[in-house]
Image: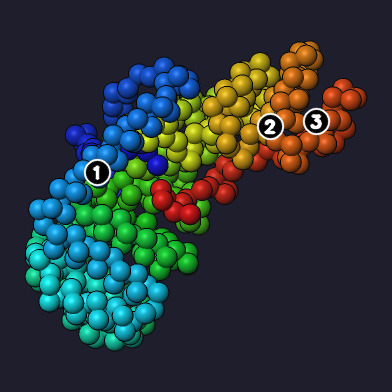
Amino acid sequence: MRVMSRMASRNSTNAVNPLLPGSYATTHPKTSSQRVRTYPTRTEFDFWNGARRVWVSAFLSFFSGLVACASNPAHVIWDREIVLAKKNTRDGNLDSASAAVAYLAATAPSTWNQFETQILRGDLYLRKNQPNSAAHTYLEAARKAPTQAHATKATYRLGQMLYGNAATEESGLATLIRIVRHEPDSPWAARSLDTLDVHFGGTQSGRTWLEKLYRALFNENPSSRVAPHLLYRGAMLHINGIKDGDLNIAMLLLTYLTENYPRSALWDNAMYGQANILHTFGRYSDEIATLRRILLEREPSYILGNYETQFYHRCSWRIAQLYAEFLNNPAAAIHELEYFVREFQYSKRFDDALFMLAVLQRKIGHINDSNHTLNKLLTARPNSRLVERARLVLQTGSDTAPPPPWSFPGTQNVDTKLPGEP
């Protein structure tokens, strides 16, 4: 995921929409200006500065909570009760949840609270296997919603409920597609796409139809919040979903996303997808440049201090592998591995990086540095699977075991998970 500062505001493009109705364009999108950043070091991401911000933020939140309790205790009590009611609903304590919903409906201090109570009542009906009552409740919540965003939330719940019933499955899918089409700036639009992926992604014909749907939805709302999601999902369908998918089209879509939606939460995913395609094409230098760009966009969070995405350690690791195994440049690989072991000490690849660094140092004749690295591996990771091999190298000066498996996904095993997914 991108850093919090990048996710703070939605970025829409002023460039001409390159995706013409009916087909993806073949022209390269206009390149936007890029921020120039120096290669990151630990000094830039001072944890203690971030920690101080956390303490200040926590104090302000606590103080605001005290003010809220003093000024309007009814809201505080109501919020506590609805959290308890939601927990009882999830845990199956339906009698307790029903009593809580009845209390909340009678004491809701505002229109927003009444809406949340209606949504909770609909969820409760679903747990009681009463779909008709749940549908009526969601419709009523959407009709009386205080804002359009609340109405979209109720409509999404209704669509999911209809989709979960075999008799109304098509109506549920149609409802979710309407959300994407008519409320593209709502967070529920992206969630609706998850259901569409699950339903249509199981068959070749379904994935082909889904790609056409995403194309049409993007062309209708190219400046919306859901537009990057449509581009990314369309690219993933071409990479590993559609039979005879076109990697050039996938590259075009991912490039358009990264250049025109730099604040999208999918920016890292799209850049990493480009690197996978470049690896498949055998363009290793371009792959390194793409991975390096992700690292150059590394930013600190003003709340959490040193904020990492799932891709930073992956990028550094892959750059080292590319230099060592594909470009035959051990010096550059050593430089990258030194950066990796310094910056990503909690990565699951940390012991692999230390061992690979020691092997490469030995390869170029830096025996003392290699011994020091191996001793660091024995000290920092005493339970690593590489400990015995490290001791063997220290004792004999060579390693007779086969090298560890360095894996490159290319486009055959592309990580299509979205931010926030386990």
Residue at image x 61%, y 40%?
348
SS assignment at label 1? helix
Q: Amino acid at mark 1?
A: Ser
Whether residue 352 is visible here, answered yes or no, is no
The residue at which mark 3 appears reads as 390
Q: For marks 3 and 2, give the CA distance.
A: 12 Å
Q: Position of residue 132 (x, y in %)?
A: 24, 86
Q: Nearer the viewer, mark 1 or mark 2?
A: 1
Name the N-terminal-most of marks 1 and 3: 1
Q: Position of residue 181 (x, y in %)?
A: 21, 59
The residue at which mark 1 appears reads as 61
Classed neighbour count for the residue bearing mark 3: other residues with Cα under 10 Å, few (<14), some (14–19), many (≥20):
many
Q: Amino acid at mark 2?
A: Ala
Q: Amino acid at mark 3?
A: Ala
Label 3–label 2 contact, CB within 8 A: no
Circle number at residue 331? none
Name the N-terminal-most of marks 3 and 2: 2
The residue at which mark 2 appears reads as 380
